[in-house]
């Protein structure tokens, strides 16, 4: 079994992560417009009708602002905790809203999605691991500190979207007000480059093939800095910095022993062309 993964957008202007197999997929968050989700998936050759659910990590607008339109247009079920649902203030058809609880797996076709609690300044925040067969992909963003839950699940992942939100020196010397700097770095905000790198170097499993560095700050980080920093410690892991302006390619994640191929899907007329690298 294999999984296909892509960041459709990653940053404070909107977050949306795609994980799926040949038959079904899920989105974790949809903080960009329905139109942009459609455009970006179309450019990648991904089909919206394969998306069988949207999982909501928390209520902040950069994670939810496209959900209502997507759900209304495509009748996609939304998995969300009761407390987060109240905080979001969604008006959704009742039958499309599904509650979830931490550490209770949800099965959607051949996918299994498991949520766990995390440290973030939201009412009931969760991260997710999406599994297919023996393949595990984590979506780990908006995390204030690398807690035991995060470490436990990171150690099981073949690929992960991992937050590297800010460079500590850039945040410290920047023009953000003191209270905002404290909110970002105070344990319930976001992971710094250093924290993300320490998590990776200390707990990376031997079978990890892809790491997508995610939710970079526009003002307190630099994509080139993150790429260079993590490339130095990659040790065979493909390092991708997810953009706040565009989708990444689609990456193919499979079990060790098979060649990990990167599939770049492009729509050409009615056909899909695959390029392998």
Image (spheres, grey):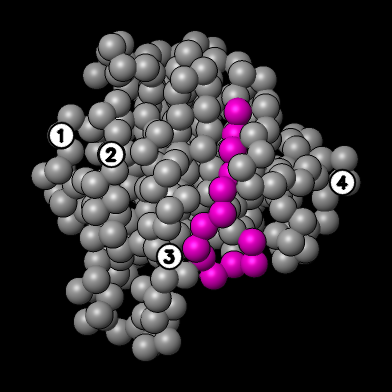
- Per the image, the residue denoted by label 2 is 204
Question: Where is residue 133 shown, x and y percent of the image?
Answer: 51, 18
* Disc 3 from disc 2: Cα separation: 19 Å
- Mark 4: which secondary structure? loop
* Disc 3 from disc 4: Cα separation: 33 Å
Any magenta on residue 244? no
- Mark 2: which secondary structure? loop
The answer to whether residue 116 is above or below residue 75 is below
The answer to whether residue 200 is above or below residue 185 is above
Name the front one of labels 4 and 2: 2
2 or 1: tag closer to the N-terminus: 2
Any magenta on residue 122? yes
- Per the image, the residue denoted by label 4 is 93
Q: How many marks?
A: 4
Quarter assignment of residue 218: bottom left
- Per the image, the residue denoted by label 3 is 144
Tell me where the magenta segment starts and ends, as one range: 112-124
Residue count near mark 3 (Cα–Cα under 10 Å), binned few <14, some 14–19, many ≥20: many
Quarter assignment of residue 248: top left
* Disc 4 from disc 1: Cα separation: 47 Å
- Per the image, the residue denoted by label 1 is 235
Q: Is residue 172 left or right of residue 20?
A: left
3 or 2: tag closer to the N-terminus: 3
3 or 4: tag closer to the N-terminus: 4
Q: Are marks 2 and 1 in contact (CB under 8 Å)?
A: yes
Residue at 40% x, 63% y: name it. 145
Name the front one of labels 3 and 4: 3
Which quarter shows the C terminus?
top left
């Amino acid at each position: 079994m294999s999984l296909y993964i892509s960041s459709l957008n990653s940053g404070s202007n909107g977050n949306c992560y795609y994980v799926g197999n040949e038959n079904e997929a899920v989105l974790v968050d949809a903080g960009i417009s329905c139109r942009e989700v459609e455009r970006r998936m179309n450019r990648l050759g991904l089909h919206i009708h394969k998306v069988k659910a949207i999982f909501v990590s928390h209520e902040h607008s950069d994670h939810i602002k496209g959900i209502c339109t997507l759900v209304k247009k495509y009748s996609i079920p939304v998995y969300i905790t009761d407390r987060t649902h109240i905080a979001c203030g969604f008006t959704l058809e009742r039958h499309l809203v599904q509650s979830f609880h931490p550490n209770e797996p949800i099965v959607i076709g051949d996918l299994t999605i498991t949520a766990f609690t995390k440290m973030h300044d939201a009412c009931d925040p969760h991260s997710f691991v999406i599994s297919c067969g023996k393949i595990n992909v984590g979506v780990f963003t908006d995390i204030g500190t690398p807690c035991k839950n995060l470490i436990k699940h990171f150690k099981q992942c073949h690929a992960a979207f991992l937050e590297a939100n800010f460079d500590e020196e850039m945040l410290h010397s920047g023009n953000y007000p003191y209270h905002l700097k404290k909110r970002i770095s105070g344990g319930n905000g976001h992971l710094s480059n250093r924290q993300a790198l320490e998590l990776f170097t200390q707990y990376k499993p031997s079978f990890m093939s892809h790491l997508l560095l995610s939710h970079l700050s526009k003002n307190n980080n630099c994509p080139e800095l993150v790429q260079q920093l993590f490339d130095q410690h990659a040790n065979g892991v493909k390092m991708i910095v997810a953009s706040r302006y565009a989708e990444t390619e689609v990456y193919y994640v499979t079990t060790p022993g098979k060649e990990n191929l990167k599939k770049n899907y492009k729509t050409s007329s009615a056909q899909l062309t695959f390029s392998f690298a």
